[in-house]
Amino acid sequence: MIRQYGTWELALPGKTDGNPFADYEIFAEVNGEKESRVVRGFYDGDGIYKVRFMPSCTGSYSYRVYGSFSDETAEGTFMVEEADSHGMVHADGTAMRYSDGTLYNSIGTTCYVWNLQSEERQQQTYESLKKTCFNKIRFCVFPKHYDFNFHDPISFPFEGTPVDNSGITKLNFNDYKPDTEGNSWDFTRINVAHFQMMDQQIQKLMEMGIEADIILFHPYDRWGFSKMTMEQNEFYLRYVIPRFAAYRNVWWSLANEYDFCQYKTNDDWEQIAAWIQAYDPYRHMCSIHNGYIMYDFSKDWVTHCSVQRQPREVDLDYIPKWLEKYNKPVVIDEMCYEGDIEHDWGNITAKEMVHRMWTTVVYGGHPGHGECYERENVWWSHGGILHGESYKRFDLLLQMMNEANGPLIPGRDRQASTADKSYMLYYFGDRQPHCKWFTLEGAHRIDLIDTWNMTVETIGTFSGKFRIDLPAKEGMALRIVKVD
Amino acid sequence: MIRQYGTWELALPGKTDGNPFADYEIFAEVNGEKESRVVRGFYDGDGIYKVRFMPSCTGSYSYRVYGSFSDETAEGTFMVEEADSHGMVHADGTAMRYSDGTLYNSIGTTCYVWNLQSEERQQQTYESLKKTCFNKIRFCVFPKHYDFNFHDPISFPFEGTPVDNSGITKLNFNDYKPDTEGNSWDFTRINVAHFQMMDQQIQKLMEMGIEADIILFHPYDRWGFSKMTMEQNEFYLRYVIPRFAAYRNVWWSLANEYDFCQYKTNDDWEQIAAWIQAYDPYRHMCSIHNGYIMYDFSKDWVTHCSVQRQPREVDLDYIPKWLEKYNKPVVIDEMCYEGDIEHDWGNITAKEMVHRMWTTVVYGGHPGHGECYERENVWWSHGGILHGESYKRFDLLLQMMNEANGPLIPGRDRQASTADKSYMLYYFGDRQPHCKWFTLEGAHRIDLIDTWNMTVETIGTFSGKFRIDLPAKEGMALRIVKVD
């Protein structure tokens, strides 16, 4: 059964002479009662071409599949039943909503190449995700070469042979400058198995209600994927975007740390963005993630600000300014990770992680988690098992976002509220006030929240000018809800 | 006996008709073997005029006292013995040194009007200071009107009568807009007792080795001192600057939170600075402290950057940039205070206070403490008894600064070292790495420092490329000292 916001797919045999990835094209024209689209398909190996389509409406659809892949066209109809999901996430001002209007409050995590680890590790990742409230995960198409990540991935996106990695140990990353020599890839031939695997991973995440924030390019490379020509990049995007775009939970992240990608200029990124726009008929969430310097998020193709927090100019304090400047959602995908590794991006305490997550929320942003305990599996990259303490505290945070009757808008200091002020969150963070004064018109119920110990205690109902006594310890928050 | 960097003082009877504060002047021309100065004196009440002089050299000095205060001149000689102190602090690039070249590493505290509290409270303050390593204290000439500070000071700087304060309670600060009406001051007549008391306070601090960072103007006022005309300001400065300048431990702070002083423009501050320069023959340390917006510290009269840390643009992360920009010492006089009051400038935890103090030091700055537990005496304003936990940890921090063989210059991240790199401090702060890698030429002794538990443990001597295991908890630091 095809559901609204589900995926309709058609597989057809086609030409196999020459290079089916490069030499032929396949398209489908799909017409429903309320929408019409032309979508591009892809070659899926073994003589099979596929087209996929995500219907936004219900009812009867007809299709016509055509292109140089075959001398014939295929035609038919299918029925789309009502959605059993909220649909696809889109930006709505500085907030995010699913297709059906439900607010999407994001609590993400990062596992850069969890999808390229062993089957057993992948299963661990799914099990871990089920225990958490994470509703977005960032990961890469390309493998990652970096500390703790010197082993080969289980598959590569292109046909060919990778460089021998036996001389690389954990201890010599700083000395080892990968020159990407010794690889042998055919950048015109896709390793179909790699993308079939990712199809399944994205679908599994979809079933779990998790957005798949797919990183299309990144700099941590010993295989040469970061040095592909723009022609090769376009070939890659023309394959991956149509292939994944029919999954409602997909987001496009042009890059992890675009400013560390030394082989691409800003003009290249703009061209890449243009190709994504051309090959994605649905306008999935799309952004580009910084190392040090934030990208110009005012560009039309940027749906949201995907930020790596940095001290000074790119600190969390600026979230309200970015919201105002860009009028787009702000997602802090990286704010350092909980952990104990030697790298400063991966060794903040669990308390500090919880603190930054709450801070992001009361500044009106959407926070992202990561974890780096130096074990054989580092969540930040491999997924697997969670060892930390912060992730357990995010259910409460998401609850506080979801129980509001609208998006949280930042106010003064670390305080956010809905537009009508009927729901307010005050987060005191590293402050330990023994009281706070309020002046509010009408009756308000006040809940005291201990963000670390995960307790919510109703203090009472108040109005006018009043004083709330607080336990004079850090990590406390107040929720103030207007009572009718 | 007059000591080098001590104070020579001469008291002489003079004219009392009219207004001796305004109508007459007294000067001393002082000639030593290696220095000559003309210094201004002041009227000290009861028909007595005084001149003071701080000799920078030893040996025989002669003086000639003259001016309209008397129809006669006084002449004489005095001998100056060798210093029993390090002398006066001055800026030396981005560092501070005493006159004898000894490095002055500052660990300050703030007690805005400790000097205007009861005699008993003042004694408590001295006793508290003796238990700490604080070597600078910030305080005001004028009384302070603010939460927890609604009682009258024990004295006022001018002759007259203050407004009745009986209607003011702790609870109504936010509602109460002091209009400074109801006071009756003669701004041309100094209350001599006020300044005699401050003389003694400054001298006592001097004996304790503590710099007196005197705040000349501030906005927290119900008496009208913040609204004095520029003519009245000049009269005030012409009195206070010559009176205190002969004390070697005096610093001038033009203002606490100059940008909150609504009755003064930047041109006024420049004029005030010019008057201070004119009446201070020694060029004491001199700066102006911000509320939100940092003053232009490139001005010639600014000896050091006196900073109130603010989120974003005025955060501690910028200290290295300010050092480079101004080539002057950076003193973070306010970085929020340890405490539990409802105001966010006074409720950070002791751990956070220690963290900010260490952070300031490894960024190459000089940190300042304060404490705000809401009791009858709030250290931040009244002095008295210290209730917190952070101050106990600063002896270790000062030791780490003083044991270096030169000023600490910030390096990458939270790491500082002497110019020759023979002494390095790595501060991990809110990070909890389980190890760090180093590559160092020559043998280095490595000490592990627990900034909170105040332990220093020598790990061993290392050279070349090596790994140091760390306890994977926050608040740790490493000291790396080159071994000959």
Image (cartoon, coloured by chain):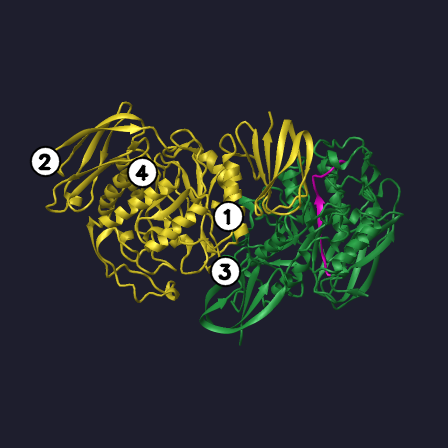
Chain colours: A yellow, B green
Image coordinates of residue A423 in percent, x first then y, are 56, 31
Looking at the rendered structure, which numbered label has been put on residue B264? none
Label 2 crowd (10 A; few <14 / some 14-19 / many >=20) = few
Q: Is residue A184 magenta?
A: no
For the residues labelled 1 and 2, the Cα–Cα distance comes to: 56 Å
Q: Pointer 3: what residue?
A: B433
Q: Amino acid at mark 1?
A: Lys
**In the foreground, A290 or A114:** A114
Which portion, as a residue range, is magenta?
B209-222
For the residues labelled 2 and 3, the Cα–Cα distance comes to: 62 Å
Subunit of mark 3? B
Whether discs 1 and 4 lie on one chain: the answer is yes
SS of the residue at dot 2? loop
Asked if the residue under mark 3 is in contact with the one under mark 4, i.e. CB atoms within 8 Å, the reply is no
Asked if the residue under mark 2 is in contact with the one under mark 1, i.e. CB atoms within 8 Å, the reply is no
Image coordinates of residue B453 in percent, x first then y, are 63, 62
Whether discs 2 and 3 lie on one chain: the answer is no
SS of the residue at dot 3? loop
| Comparing labels 4 and 3, the label whose residue is closer to the camera | 4
Q: Pointer 1: what residue?
A: A392
Q: Is residue B220 magenta?
A: yes
